[in-house]
């Protein structure tokens, strides 16, 4: 257990357009096209790098009148990484829980209004969900199993609140995801990957 919020401060510095609003999801032992199928999605042309997928996400929202979400996926070890610029399907219970059948699903989301969510699902069961900005409030079948890891990753709990501390809830969510999956997201991964792309309906 080594990752902390400090390991992910680069996201806002390197990719500010993505950092404003995104959903990152990691799915164990399921290929990208299988993830897309579970979300009732359709394939789209591949795109390379974060700037290209952010542009594609906004274009799709406009062209579909906000009825479809752009998805960019790649394989990282035994995991599929799915990125949704300005999206949230990965943390939507009605989609994520059935899509997690037979696998582990770890997803976190933030939007431009500061709303955020973290979801850990295992074989259709919600193990843990909470708002990274308010980690004291947790739900799921095992809401306290990751409490020590959450402290280590850098979530700011009520008893630790300080006006002088930098609040890095989004970055801590990346660190907790790494703790659960063993996958470290890096700037090079986001910049250099040619992503398998698709779109899925927004419900």
Image: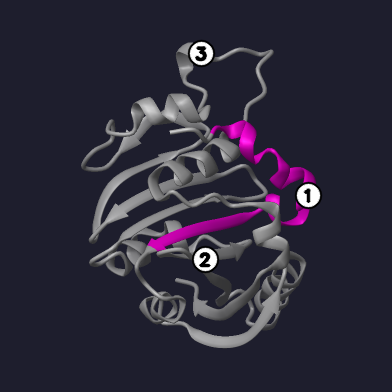
| Spatial separation of the CA atoms under disc 2 and disc 3 | 33 Å
Please state if 196 lies on the left or on the right of 177 as rendered: right
Task: Report x, y in % for residue 42.
Answer: 50, 87
Sequence-wise, the earlier of marks 3 and 1 is 1
Per the image, is 14 magenta?
Answer: yes
Q: Residue under circle 3?
A: 160
Query: What residue is disc 2 on?
Result: 82
Tell me if residue 22 can be seen: yes
Q: Secondary structure at mark 3?
A: helix
Image spot of residue 197 (x, y percent): 58, 79
Q: Nearer the viewer, residue 87 or 18?
A: 18
Residue 20 seen: no
Which disc is residue 14 wearing? 1
- At a point 50% along the width and 28% down the height, the residue shown is 155
First-in-chain label (2 vs 3)? 2
Query: Which percent across, then down, holds residue 85?
Result: 64, 63
Query: Residue 98, located in which quarter of the rendered image?
Result: bottom left
Q: Earlier in the sequence, mark 1 or mark 2?
A: 1
Left or right of 1, for residue 161: right
Residue at image point 73% right, 44% down:
12
Question: Disc 1 and disc 2: Cα gap in Å?
Answer: 19 Å
Q: Nearer the viewer, residue 112 or 84?
A: 84
Quarter of the image where one finds residue 56: bottom right
The magenta stretch spans residue 70: no
Q: Contact, CB < 8 Å: mark 2 with mark 3?
A: no
Q: Please name whichever residue, 87 or 106, is drawn nearer the observer in this view of the structure.
A: 106
What range is drawn magenta here? 4-27
SS state under label 1: helix
| Contact (Cβ within 8 Å) of mark 1 with mark 2 | no
């Amino acid at each position: 257990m080594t990752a902390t919020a400090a390991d992910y401060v680069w996201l806002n510095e390197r990719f500010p357009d993505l950092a404003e609003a995104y959903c990152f999801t990691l799915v164990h032992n399921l290929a990208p096209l299988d993830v897309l199928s579970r979300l009732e999605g359709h394939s789209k042309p591949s795109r390379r790098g974060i700037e290209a997928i952010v542009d594609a996400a906004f274009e799709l929202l406009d062209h579909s009148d906000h009825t479809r979400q752009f998805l960019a996926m790649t394989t990282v070890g035994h995991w599929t990484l799915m990125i949704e610029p300005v999206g949230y399907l990965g943390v939507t219970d009605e989609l994520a829980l059935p899509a997690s059948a037979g696998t582990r699903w770890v997803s976190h989301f933030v939007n431009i209004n500061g709303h955020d969510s973290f979801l850990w699902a295992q074989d259709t069961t919600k193990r843990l969900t909470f708002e990274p900005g308010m980690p004291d409030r947790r739900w799921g079948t095992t809401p306290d199993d990751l409490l020590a890891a959450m402290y280590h990753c850098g979530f700011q709990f009520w008893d630790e609140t300080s006006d002088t501390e930098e609040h890095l809830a989004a970055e801590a969510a990346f660190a907790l995801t790494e703790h659960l999956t063993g996958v470290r997201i890096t700037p090079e991964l986001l910049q250099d990957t040619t992503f398998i792309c698709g779109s899925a309906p927004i419900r």
